[in-house]
Amino acid sequence: ALPPLGAAYWFSFGITINAAWVLLAAGLTINQAGRALGFAGTKLSSVAVTVLFITVCLELWITGLVGTAPFGSPKAFLPVVTWALLWVFHYLRKLPSEVDEHGKRILPLYGSNFVVFYKWTALLLAMGALVLEFIILF
Protein backbone atom coordinates (compact mmCIF):
# COMPACT_ATOMS: atom_id res chain seq x y z
CA ALA A 1 0.00 0.00 0.00
CA LEU A 2 1.17 3.49 -0.80
CA PRO A 3 1.51 6.07 1.99
CA PRO A 4 -1.47 8.46 1.80
CA LEU A 5 0.77 11.54 1.97
CA GLY A 6 2.84 10.65 -1.08
CA ALA A 7 2.35 11.85 -4.63
CA ALA A 8 2.19 8.25 -5.90
CA TYR A 9 -0.85 7.61 -3.69
CA TRP A 10 -2.78 10.58 -5.08
CA PHE A 11 -1.68 9.82 -8.63
CA SER A 12 -2.96 6.24 -8.36
CA PHE A 13 -6.14 7.53 -6.66
CA GLY A 14 -6.78 9.80 -9.66
CA ILE A 15 -6.19 6.96 -12.11
CA THR A 16 -8.64 4.81 -10.16
CA ILE A 17 -11.29 7.52 -10.29
CA ASN A 18 -10.78 7.85 -14.05
CA ALA A 19 -11.18 4.08 -14.41
CA ALA A 20 -14.47 4.26 -12.53
CA TRP A 21 -15.73 6.95 -14.89
CA VAL A 22 -14.68 4.90 -17.91
CA LEU A 23 -16.69 1.94 -16.59
CA LEU A 24 -19.77 4.13 -16.13
CA ALA A 25 -19.32 5.71 -19.57
CA ALA A 26 -19.16 2.23 -21.10
CA GLY A 27 -22.58 1.52 -19.59
CA LEU A 28 -23.99 4.69 -21.16
CA THR A 29 -22.49 3.67 -24.49
CA ILE A 30 -24.22 0.28 -24.33
CA ASN A 31 -27.53 1.98 -23.56
CA GLN A 32 -27.02 4.32 -26.51
CA ALA A 33 -26.18 1.35 -28.73
CA GLY A 34 -29.50 -0.23 -27.75
CA ARG A 35 -31.24 2.96 -28.73
CA ALA A 36 -29.33 3.09 -32.03
CA LEU A 37 -30.49 -0.46 -32.75
CA GLY A 38 -34.05 0.79 -32.44
CA PHE A 39 -34.81 -0.67 -29.03
CA ALA A 40 -37.62 0.97 -27.08
CA GLY A 41 -39.96 0.04 -24.27
CA THR A 42 -39.27 -3.32 -22.66
CA LYS A 43 -36.20 -4.08 -24.80
CA LEU A 44 -34.50 -0.78 -23.98
CA SER A 45 -35.50 -1.06 -20.32
CA SER A 46 -33.99 -4.55 -20.23
CA VAL A 47 -30.74 -3.21 -21.63
CA ALA A 48 -30.68 -0.45 -18.99
CA VAL A 49 -31.34 -2.84 -16.09
CA THR A 50 -28.79 -5.35 -17.39
CA VAL A 51 -26.15 -2.63 -17.73
CA LEU A 52 -26.91 -1.35 -14.24
CA PHE A 53 -26.71 -4.86 -12.76
CA ILE A 54 -23.43 -5.66 -14.52
CA THR A 55 -21.99 -2.29 -13.50
CA VAL A 56 -22.87 -2.89 -9.84
CA CYS A 57 -21.34 -6.38 -9.98
CA LEU A 58 -18.16 -5.06 -11.61
CA GLU A 59 -17.90 -2.23 -9.08
CA LEU A 60 -18.24 -4.65 -6.16
CA TRP A 61 -15.66 -6.99 -7.70
CA ILE A 62 -13.17 -4.24 -8.58
CA THR A 63 -13.39 -2.69 -5.12
CA GLY A 64 -12.82 -6.10 -3.55
CA LEU A 65 -16.09 -6.07 -1.64
CA VAL A 66 -17.06 -9.26 -3.50
CA GLY A 67 -14.50 -11.79 -4.60
CA THR A 68 -10.74 -11.81 -4.20
CA ALA A 69 -9.84 -8.10 -4.59
CA PRO A 70 -7.76 -8.62 -7.75
CA PHE A 71 -6.87 -4.92 -7.98
CA GLY A 72 -5.94 -4.30 -4.36
CA SER A 73 -9.37 -2.99 -3.37
CA PRO A 74 -9.41 0.50 -4.95
CA LYS A 75 -12.16 2.08 -2.84
CA ALA A 76 -12.03 5.26 -4.96
CA PHE A 77 -14.72 3.68 -7.14
CA LEU A 78 -17.37 4.08 -4.44
CA PRO A 79 -17.46 7.92 -4.35
CA VAL A 80 -17.73 7.94 -8.15
CA VAL A 81 -20.63 5.47 -8.02
CA THR A 82 -22.37 7.50 -5.30
CA TRP A 83 -21.98 10.76 -7.21
CA ALA A 84 -23.03 9.29 -10.57
CA LEU A 85 -26.14 7.56 -9.23
CA LEU A 86 -27.19 10.63 -7.26
CA TRP A 87 -26.83 12.60 -10.48
CA VAL A 88 -29.08 10.05 -12.26
CA PHE A 89 -31.65 10.44 -9.48
CA HIS A 90 -31.36 14.23 -9.69
CA TYR A 91 -32.15 14.22 -13.41
CA LEU A 92 -35.05 11.81 -12.99
CA ARG A 93 -36.48 13.37 -9.81
CA LYS A 94 -39.34 15.21 -11.56
CA LEU A 95 -40.35 12.24 -13.69
CA PRO A 96 -42.80 11.13 -14.77
CA SER A 97 -43.71 14.62 -15.94
CA GLU A 98 -44.45 15.86 -19.41
CA VAL A 99 -43.11 19.31 -18.52
CA ASP A 100 -39.49 18.23 -18.04
CA GLU A 101 -37.37 18.37 -21.24
CA HIS A 102 -35.43 15.26 -20.28
CA GLY A 103 -38.72 13.52 -19.57
CA LYS A 104 -40.06 14.39 -23.00
CA ARG A 105 -37.11 12.52 -24.52
CA ILE A 106 -36.96 9.41 -22.34
CA LEU A 107 -40.55 8.71 -21.30
CA PRO A 108 -41.63 7.58 -24.78
CA LEU A 109 -38.55 5.34 -25.01
CA TYR A 110 -38.71 3.64 -21.61
CA GLY A 111 -42.22 4.21 -20.25
CA SER A 112 -43.12 6.01 -17.04
CA ASN A 113 -43.25 2.93 -14.81
CA PHE A 114 -39.70 1.97 -15.72
CA VAL A 115 -38.38 5.52 -15.26
CA VAL A 116 -39.87 5.65 -11.75
CA PHE A 117 -38.38 2.23 -10.96
CA TYR A 118 -34.95 3.25 -12.30
CA LYS A 119 -35.02 6.56 -10.45
CA TRP A 120 -35.61 4.92 -7.06
CA THR A 121 -33.20 2.08 -7.82
CA ALA A 122 -30.47 4.62 -8.59
CA LEU A 123 -31.14 6.37 -5.27
CA LEU A 124 -31.06 3.10 -3.31
CA LEU A 125 -27.81 2.02 -4.98
CA ALA A 126 -26.26 5.45 -4.34
CA MET A 127 -27.19 5.22 -0.67
CA GLY A 128 -25.77 1.69 -0.56
CA ALA A 129 -22.47 2.90 -2.04
CA LEU A 130 -22.41 5.74 0.49
CA VAL A 131 -22.94 3.28 3.36
CA LEU A 132 -20.13 1.09 2.00
CA GLU A 133 -17.85 4.14 1.88
CA PHE A 134 -18.49 4.84 5.56
CA ILE A 135 -18.07 1.18 6.52
CA ILE A 136 -14.72 1.09 4.75
CA LEU A 137 -13.54 4.41 6.25
CA PHE A 138 -14.54 3.67 9.82
Image: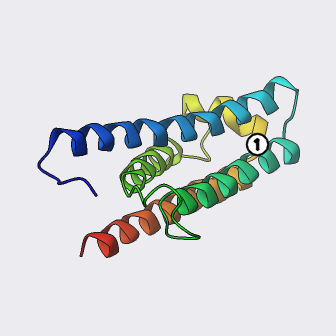
Look at label 1 and name its amino acid.
Tyr
Residue 130 position, x and y percent, is: 37, 64
- Name the one closer to the observer, 92 or 32: 32
Which image quadrant is residue 131 in? bottom left
Looking at the image, which residue is at 59% across and 42% down?
97
Up-down: is 121 above or below 44? below
Residue 57 is situated, as x and y percent measured from the top left of the image, at 63, 60
- Furthest-top residue in view? 36
Q: Is residue 120 visible?
A: no
Identify residue for label 1. Answer: 110
Q: Classify mark 1: helix, strand or loop.
A: helix
Residue 14 place in picture, x, y as percent = 32, 38
- In the picture, the quarter occupied by the N terminus is bottom left
Residue occupying the far front of the picture? 1
Residue drawn at x 17%, y 38% as measured from the top left = 7
Q: Using residue 114 as the reference point, say whether residue 97 is left or right of it.
A: left
Q: Position of residue 87 (x, y in %)?
A: 44, 44
Q: Quadrant of residue 16?
A: top left
Q: Looking at the image, is 56 positioned above or below residue 88?
A: below
Front residue (pair 115, 46): 46
- Classify 10 Å Cα crowding around label 1: few (below 14), some (14-19), many (20 and above): some
Residue, x 40% and y 55% (percent of image)? 74
Tell me: 78 left or right of 12. Answer: right
Task: State the image quarter where residue 27 is shown.
Answer: top right
- Confirm whether residue 130 shows in the render: yes
